[in-house]
Amino acid sequence: MGGFQVFKFFRNAVSATILIGLACWSASAAELANVISCKNGTDFVATSLKQANSKIVLKCSEGATILPAIDSKKFCKDAGCTQQDQLTQVGVSAGAASEVEVAGVSQKTDELTLTLTKNPTNSQTAYFQCIEPKKLREESGLTEQDSATQVACTIQLAIHGSAPASTPTEESKPCITVQ
């Protein structure tokens, strides 16, 4: 009888461990789902922030860097990044680049954490660029503005506003067609 109780105990312990492992795995998978990255061969990625306090992490492929610079807390107003504005203007806060320890040396990663602090009144679109390769750009002395020809990927971020896209009176207007 004693052996059966020990077996039951181990079976319950293994079951509990599996359940805890699955819960942790699904929680970490949910975190990974919010990482938006440009995979090799992808030149355009679209994502969105819909609700207040929602977060995403923008990440470029290895060796690439995010433009506008992470520390600037700015976004591009168009896909070509000809104009920039502060992220706070569209209700978004930017987190600093994370640091990863590789072989005992702390290195910054080119990741940008964006949090929608407050939905803007009207929906907005922000753009970010992944510029490659970082090392070659630095060696050639190119500045951020000179890097436009080195764009590996463009990330489009739709920021949902609190106001509806159209009003009921606009929707009820008849369409006029000219023939």
Image (spheres, grey):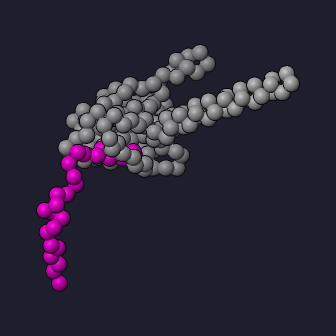
Pick out the residue farthest to the top: 104
Residue 46: image location, x then y, percent: 40, 49
The residue depicted at 20 percent of the width and 48 percent of the height is 163
Q: Is residue 37 visible?
A: yes
Q: Main secondary structure of the magenta part?
A: loop
Left or right: residue 27 compared with residue 73: right
Q: Is residue 79 above or below residue 19?
A: below
Pick out the residue farthest to the bottom: 179
The residue depicted at 31 percent of the width and 37 percent of the height is 52
Magenta residues?
154-179
Residue situated in front as seen by the camera: 11 or 50: 11
The residue depicted at 48 percent of the width and 27 percent of the height is 109
Q: Is residue 168 above or below residue 129?
A: below
The residue depicted at 37 percent of the width and 27 percent of the height is 95
Residue 177: image location, x then y, percent: 17, 78
User: Which image quarter is the N terminus in?
Assistant: top right
